[in-house]
Image: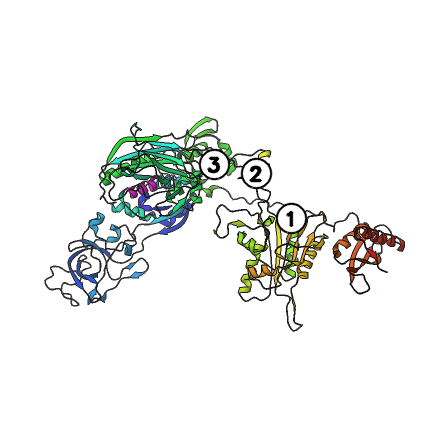
Amino acid sequence: MRVPLNWLADYVDLPAETDPHALAAEFAGVGLEEEDFFGPEITGPLVVGRVLELVKEEHSNGKTINWCRVDVGDEHNEAADNPKDPQPGEERPSRGIICGAHNFDAGDLIVACLPGAVLPGDFQIAARKTYGHISDGMICSAKELGLGEDHSGIIVLKDLGLIGEPGDDAISLLGLDQVTLDVNVTPDRGYQLSMRGIAREYAQMKGQSFTDIGSASVAAVNTPTDDGFPVVIEDSNPINEVAGCDQFTAVQVTGLNPKAQTPFWMQRRLQQAGMRPISLTVDVTNYVMLELGQPLHAYDTALLGDEIVVRRATAGENFTTLDDVERTLDAEDLLITDRGAGPSGKGGKIIGLAGVMGGADVEVNDQTTEVVIEAAHFDPISIARTSRRHKLSSEASRRFERGVDPKLGPVAARRCADLLVELGGGTLSPATTQIGQAPEPTVIELPVERVDSLVGVDYTTAEVTGLLEGIGAAIEVVGKGRLAVTVPSWRTDITDDVDLIEEVARTGGYHRIPSVQPAAQAGKGLTEAQKTRRRISNLLAADGFTEVLSYPFTNSKRDDQLRLEADDVRRAHVRLANPMSDDLPLMRTNLLSTLVDLVVRNLGRGVKDVALFEAGLVSTSAGLPEGPGPRHLPGYHPSDAELEKIYDSVPHQPYHYAGIISGHAELPGVWGKGRPAEAADVIDTVRRIARTNGLEVTVEADQIAPWHPGRAAKFVLADGQVLGHAGELHPKVCENLGLPARTVAFEIDLDALLAQEDLRAWDGALSTYPVSRQDVALIVDAELPTQTLAATLREGAGEELELLETFDLYTGDQLPEGKKSLAFRLTFRAPDRTLKADDASAMREAATKLAAERHGAEVRS
């Protein structure tokens, strides 16, 4: 919120010598943090000048310029006999200035910038020769002085309604010496988005009395009449069962002078507040909004239908807003429409997105003589959703979504009408529409001792009463140390006694609250999940992988590039309602879909060998119920059954690890040519991840995108869950993504890993007895995975099998076709005795017997 200090001084006793930086520090003490300062940007002589003579000269470049003699006051005029360019017969001293604008005549008062002055943008003014003359200064336009964007002509004081004499200081005349303070208003304090709200904070901060110019008991309001402009509210789709519009005030002004101009003082204040002056009617509505905090809209009565209708949109309706953007509407959007033919023969049209932005159909123009002024109160949630849905933030929506004083509408409408009557020559019509009433005020009981206990400051009852009255609350003592506080209508953020206590602490001064360092709680160490993530990340980093972080957003095109099947569960994305980019509207279901982008980026930077890994969440919509999940109002605590439904509606978000190696797994150097990465590298990486965390996995061949069908492995945990996949990426996938051929990758599900029992845990002490080793070679089908056979041997051998190793693979001529020989070493150890050879042999025989039953294994002699 930009606060022009000269405007603030209209409402409070603000000393002329106020230091804006000191004021900003004081405002910060009550929660209004400084954002910026906008102060004087012009130095040097900027004065009022009178054009004494104007000679038009045409030049060879086709441009006509004005050679002017300008009286800039006795202090600044040069000698009458100008030796540089004498003008015989001139009655009094003046300066010669070249000007290319043509919107002024001799005798006009203008603004002259003289040599030595510096304009905004560090534009230094000096005398210079141009078009055959010495131009001893510059006649200024509004844009050159930072007063707007108009550069079509120079400033003529009579056009601004200003007067002066040659030589007068134009800096103060135009308000260019004034300071504007920009403060940050937090979302829960919408009332501060107005001069009314800021003035109230200043008055309480300085201990001044405050007259509320937005109170109906102080300001004039119109009495509702039966002949007011017809307004109908038809809300068929309220959000959270709250009406989108609960109050609507309409006041009419007739007989406006369509040529009336906005006075300069109002234009200047709007500019200081960051708004562009447009026309008298629009400027007055904006001025009152900035002054009181109530957004207003003025409609040309001649262009309106017979009645105004507030309704929800029909899904798919289109409407072009004032910024010339055609928008497709949602059923939640609240609209201002009209109905009936109306005086112009038009009607039955959308005339505005309620509380956000109007349309051009009934916009006031340079022929408007009658207006209907709308001052409505809208539901903050409805306005906020519309604003975000259409990515359309306006000064009105900023205020409505933060909460506008529900009692302010009639006051603001009348204030706007009075200004139009005063400045535009109009007549206030007694016909007034007022639908709805402001809600009953909230009354909260506050024990004073609770203030002391929460804040840590010993406040007296009188002090608490004074501080709360300062924010506009009404106080009644209802018992010893107990107050009944009637919350002011503009403080919709105050709903409980703790909110009142916060106001006491804020307005009483945060500096009074003692600083007490809390005692640090004893640490509990890392969780098991944190330890596991740290182990895996350390292992990957030690293997040469670099950890990266990619954005979790993707699109369906990436699924096609990864060659995912149409029914692949990884295509069940969560779609974002408001994506950062329209090209990436989906949440990723696997890490590889976004990790590949970083690999491609590194390759594009000239890196030949890349090994990256990422750890993070993925999301899936698989298993979610149809339609949106349950919604509840803020402050409502759902029941256990309702909480279960809420959790069921939240997408599943498992934690994954993924890695990609492109190029060499072993880098070339003086030691050799190096070795390109291959499927075995990432398969071994996943096996070591499992082993590092005390787990054994079964490795099976698998055919799943995006991996090569003959060079990919699936990892199955003890409980049957799939840990993940690893292997070489499909050649087509590499081609689609711009990756080198034979790129390898893995992706695992950490949640599945954490659900397993850590096999490194044991009960009791370590065995001190010696081991007994047995070797066995088994002939099995060539297609049988080694891991499957090893798992069977481990199961058959029993609990005293400590280690199982594969040390030989034979596929020679001595074996039948389609067979292979696998040799295993079984290491046994008992916790309570030394195993005999017969004991170890019996356990080996039990293992080979189970392998024979399940896989037809034969012992090779």
Point out residue 390 in the picture as x, y percentages from the top left corner.
Answer: 42, 45
**Residues in magenta, as a range:** 281-292
Which label belongs to residue 21? Answer: none
Mark toward the viewer: 3 or 1:
1
Kind of residue at disc 3: Asp
Q: Residues within 10 Å of mark 3 (few under 14, many from 20)?
A: few
Quadrant of residue 301 within the rendered picture: top left
Kind of residue at disc 2: Ile
Mark 3: secondary structure? helix
Sooner in the amino-acid sequence: mark 3 or mark 2:
3
Residue situated furthest top in the rendering? 479
Which label belongs to residue 499? Answer: 3
Instruction: Tell whether label 1 touches label 2 (CB within 8 Å).
Output: no
Front-most of residues 426 and 82: 426
> Spatial distance from mark 3 to mark 2, Cα to Cα?
28 Å
Q: Residues within 10 Å of mark 1 (few under 14, many from 20)?
A: some
Where 483 falls versus 366 (above or below)? above
Kind of residue at disc 1: Asp
Front-most of residues 398 and 173: 398
Query: Mark 1 highlights which residue?
Result: 751
Where 838 falls versus 357 (above or below)? below
Instruction: Tell whether label 1 touches label 3 (CB within 8 Å).
Output: no
The magenta stretch spans residue 483: no
Point out residue 589 in the picture as x, y percentages from the top left corner.
Answer: 58, 50
Query: Mark 2 highlights which residue?
Result: 646
